[in-house]
Amino acid sequence: MRAVKACITCVMLAVFLAAMANAMPLNSSARSVIPAELQQLISVDYRALKDSATAMQLKQQLMPDNIKEFETALKGVGIDPDKDVDTLAFAAFRTAKGGTKAVGVAAGPFAMKTVVKKMTLRKIKPTKYRTSSIYPMDGGMMMCFLDDSTLLFGEMAAVKLALDTRDGLTLSMDTNSTMSDMMSDVDSGPVWSILDQQGTQNVMLSTSP
């Protein structure tokens, strides 16, 4: 029975991957906020998912829990990941104090002015962090537009660290040659992940948090 289940799983994954092509890599705004001390990066190409009904059905079964949490946060501000997002990345990184923080970066055709207007109508005021405006989201997360179509979000401390990286106060992942090289090997897949820890590995499809 286990062999049969394993075979079915392999077939499902093969269909999932074969149904999609021409995935989108991380844009420059997304890359700029990811610190050099990157521990794990997961990227989901929603544009590719939209092109396959089968892939959309498999999505909920295969998607890591941390990506699902970020999807819920986006829905709380009126952004539907299945309709309004092209790519969603989850980045976990080490901090100077030895802990780990995580941020999400969503890119898509959602308009910054429209989202900000919705926040204003709900009387939600931003917190200024240098030149950036950080808005509260449901679930204790915060969000900040990096440009008209790229949104950074996560806990306040993590968002600030990401903005520090973008503003050149800390090194970005582009200075981490190990992780950058790993990403260049896998970032053409619809769902891909790179992981840097003891026993560093890179995988095309991650099904675990």
Image (cartoon, rainbow, N blue to C red):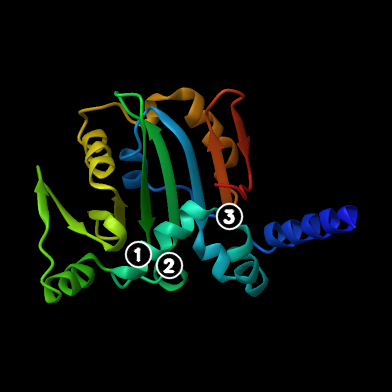
What residue is rendered at 35% in x and 44% in y? Answer: 28
Residue located beneath label 1 in the image: 74
Lower sequence index among marks 3 and 2 = 2
Q: Nearer the viewer, mark 3 or mark 1?
A: 1
Residue 29 in picture, x, y percent from top left: 31, 46
Residue 197 in picture, x, y percent from top left: 53, 26
Contact (CB < 8 A) between labels 2 and 1? yes
What residue is rendered at 31% in x and 39% in y? Answer: 32
What residue is rendered at 26% in x and 34% in y? Answer: 165
Mark 3: secondary structure:
loop
Give the residue type at disc 1.
Leu
Residue located beneath label 3 in the image: 190
Q: Quadrant of residue 202?
A: top right
Give the residue type at disc 2.
Pro
Residue 170 in picture, x, y percent from top left: 25, 27
Give the number of callouts. Answer: 3
Lower sequence index among marks 3 and 1 = 1
Give the residue type at disc 3.
Pro
Mark 2: secondary structure:
helix
Residue located beneath label 2 in the image: 81
What residue is rendered at 50% in x and 46% in y? Answer: 42
Q: Is residue 42 above or below residue 115?
A: above
